[in-house]
Image (tube, grey):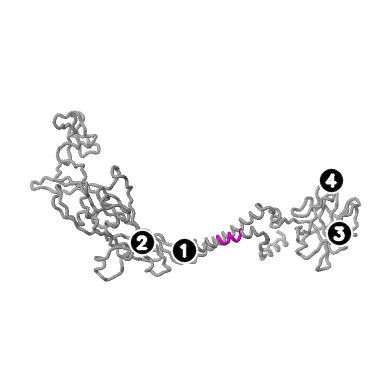
Amino acid sequence: MGQAGCKGLSQSLLDYKTEKYVIAKNKKVGLLYRLLQVSILTYLVVWVFLVKKGYQDTDTSLQSSIITKVKGVTFTNTSELGERLWDVADYVIPPQGENVFFVITNLIVTPNQQQKTCAESESIPDALCYRDSDCPPGEPVVAGNGVRTGRCLRVGNMQRGTCEIFAWCPVETKSRPEKPLLGKAEDFTIYIKNFIRFPKFNFSKTNVLDTKDKAFLKSCHFGPENPYCPIFRLGSVVSWTGSNFQEIALQGGVIGIQIEWDCDLDKASSECNPRYSFSRLDNKFSENSISSGYNFRFAKYYRDGAGVEFRTLMKAYGIRFDVMVNGKAGKFNIIPTIINIGSGVALMGAGAFFCDLVLIYLIKKSHFYRDKKYEEVRSVMLLPLQPGGTFVGAPLIRAPLPGLETLPWLDGNAWCVAAGPLGAPLEGPRKVECSENMLYRAGYSLRAAGRRKGLQRPWAGDVVSRPDSAAICHVTSDKSEASLGLSFSLREHASTYVLGFLDL
């Protein structure tokens, strides 16, 4: 790279480039642009900053701990269990008080089971038999209670019987009570204690009122007026899900308790409050559906005086509670604020881009606005003048310049040439830019004349006498004595002619 090239590069590093703006006096496009600006500004202020609080840094990695306790007692008197008092140790599983716990509301009890041989239940399809060969010994009964012994047991003179099995006998009865055993459990209470922490902001809180009054939790109940009393009546929780307690207690179900913490840490910590919602999570089918309800089995084992092991099998129906906690915390941060403002500014640019598309492609005068917005610039070589003011050199422009005026009444090819002050030669060769309207912006006026085969067609200004094959445009300055000449040398067999303006 030469010395001149290095000098030009170093000077260009200090150049500042700015955009050229075209003001389009079009009311429809202007109205569209303002509507887009108002819409984007409304979206940015209302939705991004007021609703979504885009000026805040957020923490969704909530750390939570749940402690649950159920309280209440009830009394039952059945043929299988006799008189029995039920307390929390009997009907709550598991007893640790986790975020998922089960409250027994109904039971099928099979007492005094012992491991021995007995007939399989007739409700098991795989246990039906007609002969001993239908009960191969040692094979378990599918969906049954034990393994076959090889005998087919019949009652009376019936041809069909059931296989004998080795199992806990007698086998479980299949009859479910018509009313829930612990129907009064709807008056039990649930204590749900929740600790939460947002690690990013080191913020912690609990859903229990911070008080030294020991009687507070013994007398309060959850409600709109007591959001920091986490004592819930069992029947009320079920009713808040839209279910009937006696119906769900009969065959069981699953209840979800949702605790949501949405904390704006730009405000006082007292403004960060828990919000509860309750829903039934299991699919509520019709009463006759085999998929309805929730149940499981467990047993209690014991031995008699002779050391023989017995057990009491219980098929428990009840309500499973799932306590779920989620939330987020937000606090002002300059980084998301700048990012969201930058996004809004970018959307403003997108609105301008859309209006540009409408302006230069979709409206009737789009070609006019397009010509004004996009300006093509080409370089030409200036050649020295010969004595007498004529120009020499090869043709410099062989095609029409886009956006310039076409002169269909001229014949021949057009060359774009320039001169210095009239009658003086140019220093050259050098390059200048040919572009439309440059002269008008510089304060120059145009006077031109043209002739063709004796027919004179003046535009404006004086007519300059030249040979029939030439037309000359004189450009004079309103602000100085300098002037430029624009000459069109004509040749035959040409189709278009261009009037070009030179950048001064």
Disc 3/disc 2 C-alpha distance (Å): 90 Å
Residue 359 point in image, percent of width and height: 65, 55
Q: Which residue is mark 1?
A: 53
Labels 4 & 3 near each other (Cβ < 8 A): no
Is residue 206 something that shows in the picture? no
Q: Residues within 10 Å of mark 3 (few under 14, many from 20)?
A: many
> Where does residue 413 sit, x and y in percent of width and height?
83, 50
Relative to 455, residue 165 above or below: above
Q: Residues within 10 Å of mark 1 (few under 14, many from 20)?
A: some
Element assignment for label 1 = loop
Neighbour class for label 2 at 10 Å: few (<14), some, many (≥20)?
Answer: some
Name the residue located 13 percent from the left edge and 31 percent from the top edge. 156
Q: Counting residues from the N terminus, which is met first, the one under dot 1 or under dot 2?
A: 1
Report the span colored magenta: 32-39
Amino acid bearing label 3: Leu
Q: Callout 4, which amino acid?
A: His
Which structural element holds mark 3? loop
Q: How many numbered marks appear?
A: 4
Observer-nearest of 456 and 184: 184
The residue pinned by badge 2 equals 275
Quarter of the figure with residue 459: bottom right
Give the residue number, with chain letter if any, for mark 4. Answer: 493
- The residue sitting at the bottom extreme is 212
Residue under pointer 3 = 385
Which marked residue is nearer to the observer: mark 4 or mark 2?
Answer: 2
Q: At label 2, which amino acid type do we have?
A: Arg
Q: Amino acid at mark 1?
A: Lys
Report the mark closest to the observer, 4 or 3. 4
